[in-house]
Amino acid sequence: MFSISKRSEVEPFHAMDVLAEATKRRAGGHPVISMAVGQPSHPAPQAALEAARAALAEGRIGYTDALGTARLKHALAWYYRARHGLEIDAVRIAITTGSSAAFNLAFLSLFDAGDAVAIARPGYPAYRNILGALGLNVVEVPVTSETHFTLTPESLEAIQKEKGVRLKGVLLASPANPTGTVTGREGLKALAAYCDANDIAFISDEIYHGLTFAGEETSALELTDEAIVINSFSKYYCMTGWRIGWMVLPERLVRPIERVAQSLYISPPELSQIAATAALGAAEELDRVKASYAANRDLLLDRLPKLGLAPASPMDGAFYAYVDVSRFTNDSMDFARRMLAEINVAATPGLDFDPVEGPRTLRISYAGSEAEIAEAVERIGVWLK
C-alpha cells in the first residue's frame, strides 16, 4: 500500500508548547511545576541504567535488525506469557523507535490515502495529526458517559451513517489519554469482534498498561490474533527519552512492517533495546513508582472537585485528570497560559484532545512526585479563590 497524499496541515500540539514555555520559565528562575506532559518523574529503572552503562563501557553500539534484537523480542514474549498467559511467537513482535514510530508504521502499512479511520474524541492529538498528514480521513467519535467514555460497535455504526463513510480502521487506547478510561474486557471483546466481522483493522494502543487503578486491564491479544497492538517503555517503565516501543502483529503484517521500518528508521537504537530488555525485570521497583501515582490520584480525586475542577471522565488508568474548567472559563488555552504565568503551574488545554468540547477542559498529569502534585494543587486552590 504505502500511499501518501500531498501533505496536509498539522494542527499544533499545545502540550509541547506549554512544556517549552514551562522550560523557558524554569530556566529563568521561576519555580515551575509541570503537569503538562505524560513524563514520569522517576528515572529509568536501575536495572536498565546498569545495563546501559555496561553496554557503553563495552563501547560498540550499532545497527540491529530493523525490527529489533532477538533478545528483546524473546523477553517481550516472556512478558506476555507471564502477564497475560499468552504464547506469542517472538517473530510477531516488532521493536520500534517509541510508540510514535509504531503508529507511523501501522498507518503506512494498513491504509491508503483517503481511508477512514476512527478514533475517540477526546483523544491523543498525535493520532489525528499523523493520520491527517498521511492523507487519511480522520473520523472522530465522541465518547461520553453514555458510551462509558470508550468506543463501542454502536457508536462506530452511528458515526459511519452520520459521515457516510465505511471504516477501514479503528484505533482505541486503554487506558486512554486524556480521559483515563479503561475499556473493560467485555467492551474490548465486542469492539474486536465488530472489527473482525467487518474487515476493519483494529489497532489497540496499550502504552499505559501497568498503570490501571480501577477496572480490567485487558490486552486485545487475549481476544483476537488480528489486532495490531502497540506498546511502549515510556510510561510504566519511565523511559520516555529512550524512545523505545514495540508492536505485536498478525504474522502476515510482519514483513510489510519490516520493509517500511527499514526505509524510515533503519533500526531502533541498540542502547535503548539493551536497557529495555533489563527493564522488563524491574517490576518491583516500578510498582513502587505506580504506588506514588496512586497516592497522587487519590489526592486529586479528593481536592479537585472541592476546587470546582470536577473530573470530566474517569481517572481509572494512565496518570491524567481530565477536568471540567467551565466554571471558570470557556477558553482552556487562555486558562492554561494564565496559570503558568501567574502561579508557575503548567497543564494542558483540552483543545489538544477535543477540538469541539476542549475549550472547557484541562488535562493534568499526576506523574510527578507526590510533593510536586501537592504543591501544585495548593497553588491552584489559592489562585482560583
Image (cartoon, grey):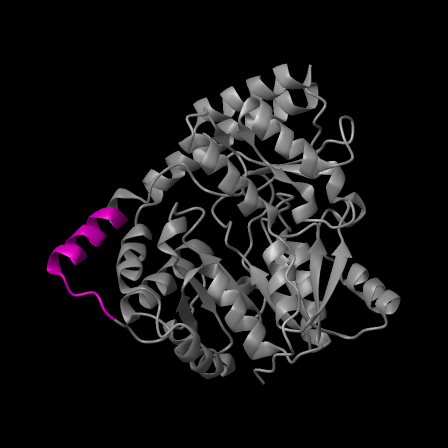
Q: Is residue 188 left or right of residue 164?
A: left
Q: Is residue 259 above or below residue 315?
A: below
The residue nearer to you, when weighing 306 against 83, is 306
Q: Nearer the viewer, residue 343 or 279?
A: 343
Which residue corresponds to the image point at 27% horizontal and 53% vertical from the top-left? 278
**Quarter the N terminus occupies:** bottom right
Q: On the picture, is 286 further left or further right than 158?
A: left
Q: Position of residue 338 (x, y in %)?
A: 64, 29
Q: Quadrant of the C terminus?
A: top right
Q: Is-magenta flag for residue 58?
A: yes
User: Which residue in the rendered view is the most extreme toward the left?
Assistant: 58
State left or right for residue 378 relative to residue 260. Answer: right
| Residue at 87% across, 68% down | 161
Residue 128 or residue 159, whichever sits in front = 128
Residue 58 appears at what percent x and percent y? 12, 60
Front-most of residues 385 and 89:
385
Numbered range of the magenta stretch:
48-62
Q: In which quarter of the view is residue 42 placed? A: top left
Residue visible at 71% across and 75% down in the picture: 197
Kindly indicate the quadrant of the structure image that contains residue 139.
bottom right
Q: How many marks?
A: 0
Q: Main secondary structure of the magenta part?
A: helix
Q: Can residue 171 be seen in this snapshot?
A: yes
Q: From the viewer's perspective, is residue 14 above or below residue 290?
A: below
Q: Is residue 264 magenta?
A: no
* Residue 3: x %, y % from top left: 60, 82
